[in-house]
Image (spheres, helix red, strand yellow):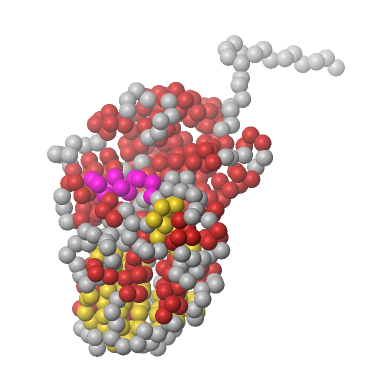
Amino acid sequence: MSEQPRRPRKPGKPYRRPQKDPVRILAFEALRAVDERDAYANLVLPPLLRKAREKEGPEKFDARDAALATELVYGTLRRQGTYDAIIADCVDRPLREVDPPVLDVLSLGVHQLLGTRIPSHAAVSASVELARVVLGDGRAKFVNAVLRKVARDDLDGWLERVAPPWDEDPEDHLAVVHSHPRWVVSALWDSLGGGRSGIEELLAADNERPEVTLVARPGRATPEELLGEEAAVPGRWSPYAVRLSEGGEPGAVEAVREGRAGVQDEGSQLVALALANAPLDGPDRRWLDGCAGPGGKAALLAALAAERGAFLLASEKQPHRAGLVARALDGNPGPYQVIAADGTRPAWRPGSFDRVLVDVPCTGLGALRRRPEARWRRRPEDLEGFAPLQRGLLRGALEAVRVGGVVAYATCSPHLAETRAVVADVLKQHPGTELLDARPLLLGVTDLGEGPDVQLWPHVHGTDAMYLALVRRTS
């Protein structure tokens, strides 16, 4: 049997295998998980990084690899709106017609070009190699063509080209320049009360990488112990807060591993402290956290309650989240109980508690620094879905507290429909209540507005945009 003649090779460059870059492949995988599964980067990225660190050979990650992968993922998500506008100017079709995986590779490339110090030729080359690995040679050529167009200008030049002028449409200008949906820009601007400088500072702060903040749980750890860790500095406001400067790893802190300390934003700590320090009329023996998952505030409240000999009931509707609460409170020195229960249909008798916290589910617009992808998922209509639940939880809290006791209504959103509107509506239906001035209970914190409620801000206080209203039941 004669051999088949070999097919002649086409003239041109010989085929070269694409070079695998573990850092960029991991960043791409994280972005795909965020897009395909509606996952959150802060939940997806840590296990991917952990797996990469455990590998042997050239794909094993070191600290610099992990830092670059983290920057690529979070930077791309934060600037997605801006990068979409730039990419749209460089392609010959509507952006919705570009396959999402291709768009992820393009966005990663644009972030390297416009948001990092990576040289342009290296950013383009690395992105094209990534495209060859995950998309194939054909679409890699498309990625190469688009990124070469992007590389012709810097970020300021592109913003001047793609962002509407301020004088023509200030909200759309801010949306493109600062990478927020227009409706979010409008809502945040309303919450701030107007003025250009404030909204620009807030939107810019949303795009900054937040520091990791730890809480030393009273009676279990001290700030001094945490300050002995590398890269640790004191918190700005909370007496229990310690910040980890860039590169600090919470998992490397012994007290965190043992549950004696935890990761908790200072705004969240301040809400718990304000409730714990609010003046009461009468006894101070029973506390309730009515929306306790995933357990950060409950763990701090339980530790504070233990110092006074008070009991904390931590209630969470979702059983799996109640499990997270139980894990956070494990080892607390004082009496506590964790249950799975619905705060709008209480499992306790009316008037059973002296202090009650309800940190209600919300749009999360106050934590866009930590969950940048949330800004692209939320829609204005989401507010209508949260509204009945938020009002129901506050009503349930007011029924759970005794006369003379205090309720803290908190939410990680500055949207007026989730903050003052909820409190005003519910208190109209409960005449036997009064708003307390929360400002003096946030000791040392400045720029807290006219009160009596409190709105914290990333650009003013360096915290998430937590809202707090304290209500005393008077009859």
Name the one closer to the observer, 325 or 211: 211
Q: Is residue 11 left or right of residue 238?
A: right
Image position, residue 226 (x, y; %):
47, 58
Image position, residue 387 (x, y; %):
30, 68
At 51% from the left and 66% from the top, the residue drawn is 260
Rendered image quadrant of residue 83: top left
Residue 134 highlighted magenta (yes or no): no
Q: Is residue 318 shown to the viewer in this render?
A: no
* Residue furthest left as drawn: 167
Q: From what the image shows, is residue 203 above or below residue 102?
A: below
Q: Is residue 78 shown to the viewer in this render?
A: yes
Q: From what the image shows, is residue 361 above or below residue 434?
A: above
User: Total label count?
Assistant: 0
Rendered image quadrant of residue 280: bottom left
Image position, residue 335 (x, y; %):
49, 81
Residue 202 highlighted magenta (yes or no): yes
Q: Which residues are magenta?
A: 200-210
Q: Is residue 9 left or right of residue 305?
A: right
At 27% from the left and 33% from the top, the residue drawn is 159
At 17% from the left and 39% from the top, the residue drawn is 166
At 56% from the left and 50% from the top, the residue drawn is 47
By secondary structure, the bulk of the magenta-drawn segment is best described as: helix
- Quarter of the image for the C terminus: give it: bottom left
Q: From what the image shows, is residue 229 above or below residue 123?
A: below
Image position, residue 8 (x, y; %):
67, 12
- Quarter of the image for the N terminus: give it: top right
Q: From what the image shows, is residue 462 above or below residue 93?
A: below
